[in-house]
Every structure is written in structure tokens, then in C-alpha cells.
Image (tube, grey):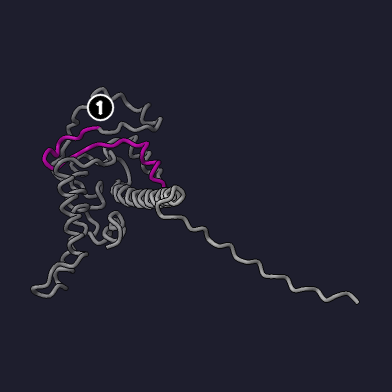
Amino acid sequence: MAPPKQPKKAKSQKREKLFHPQSRKADQLARVQLRKSKLADLTKARNKKHGQQVDLYSFFYHAMPPEGVLCLEDLHSIIRDVWLPRFDSEIEAEKAARRKGRPKSSKEQKLEDLKLREAEEYRTGLEVIDLTDPTNVELFRQWDMKEAPFIQQLRFIRICSETPDVAILTRPGKHPFLAKSKSTTNENEARVSEGVDDMDTDEAPLLMEPLERFSSTIMAMDGPL
């Protein structure tokens, strides 16, 4: 008769090695952990920036007219009358909900700070996609509203509220179609807008939209409140 099998001994768990806090090995492990933490933070920041860019470009995507392009005056009107005051209703709601003598809520403070920061950027110079250039607008219409790298191929201009009749070309665009477009001898000089007496709202459809339409998606640019 065969002898009964002896039960297998459970494998003893490996003890985690301990290192002196001032040893070379402990310092090496700390550096590795720090590097992993930095990489994770960079990835998080990159993803956040990507989301912010998509939200911003989406706004201007919807600002495009169904056909043709915007004149410089229309572009200023969209920024001034739609983009900048898009959170006004939320700010007023926060003010109305706040009891007398109470400090501002974090949401109200954040929205007000964001509005002031954007207004100052517009006053000193705001870089936007050039919606006055036909080739650029046609390319922009092909965007899937997801991939921000596609936008980097487009043409950008800088405009400001203090000189509304001037736009400075900041990025001529890397797309081959833009390179083949009409010659722009004075690309790096100020471009004067054509100007119109009465703006046609059919050419700038966002001016007729309620401001609340844009507050929910664009707020993602600054993260959660």
C-alpha cells in the first residue's frame, strides 16, 4: 500500500525588502516613484488641455456661417456678444441664490474670474481661427470636432477689442491647401476689415442663439467647479 501523500506546504510569502531611508536603494526607489508621479501629472494635464482646446474650437466651429465666410466685424461681434457673456446667466443665478451677507460661492467666483481673464485676453489680443479666409473655413468645415491636432494645420489670427479693424496673422497654416491659396504678400502685416454698416445675422447665426447654449460645454475648459 502506497504511503499517503504528504500535504504540500504552503509557499511562504516573500517578505518585502526594507531599506534604510538614507540608503542608495531607497533613494533610487524614491526617484522612480517621483518620475512615475510626474508622468501621470503630465498625462493628466495634456488630456485636460486637449479637452479645453476641443471645446474652444467647437465654439468657433458652430460660429461658422452655413456658406461663405465672416467679415472681421462679425467675428468681433460673436466674441463680444456670445463668447464673453456666455456665463452671465449662471453668475446671476448664483448671485440670486446667495443670502445677504454671505460670501460668493466658489462657482460664482470661478466664473467671474474666468470672464475677467477672457475679457483681458480679448482686450490685449486673442488668437482665433481665421474665419475670414475662404480656404481656411472650408478646411475647418471638414473637422470631426474631436481631433485637436487637425486644427493646428489651420490659419490663425490675433484680434483685440482695442483695434477691432485690425487682425494680425499669427499662424499661416500648415495644410497644403493653404499653401496653394492666393498669394499673401502682406501676411504678417495688419489686415483691415471690409466693414459693414448693418451686420447680417444670417451670416453670423450664433448671435441669434441663447447664451445658455454654450455654457455647459465650454465650462469644461477650466475643469470642474
Against 11, residue 79 (above or below) is above
Q: Specify whether residue 161 is painted magenta.
A: yes
For the C terminus, which image quadrant? bottom left
Secondary structure beneath disc 1? loop
Q: Residue at x 13, y 69 (%)?
A: 103
Q: Position of residue 59 (x, y in %)?
A: 30, 51
Q: Residues within 10 Å of mark 1 (few under 14, many from 20)?
A: few
Answer whether residue 146 is visible to the viewer in this image: no
Q: Position of residue 76 (x, y in %)?
A: 18, 44
The residue singled out by tag 1 in the image is 187
Taking depth in this image into account, of 103 and 65 the one nearest to the observer is 103
Q: Which residue range is magenta in the image?
A: 146-169
Q: Is residue 10 left or right of residue 16?
A: right
Q: Position of residue 87 (x, y in %)?
A: 21, 60
Q: Residue at x 15, y 47 (%)?
A: 120
The image quadrant that residue 187 belongs to is top left
Q: Specify whether residue 73 is painted magenta.
A: no
Q: Label 1 is placed on what type of residue?
A: Glu
Query: What count of labels does the image hold?
Result: 1
Farthest residue, direction left = 101
For the N terminus, which image quadrant? bottom right
Taking depth in this image into account, of 146 and 113 the one nearest to the observer is 113
Taking depth in this image into account, of 15 and 160 the one nearest to the observer is 15
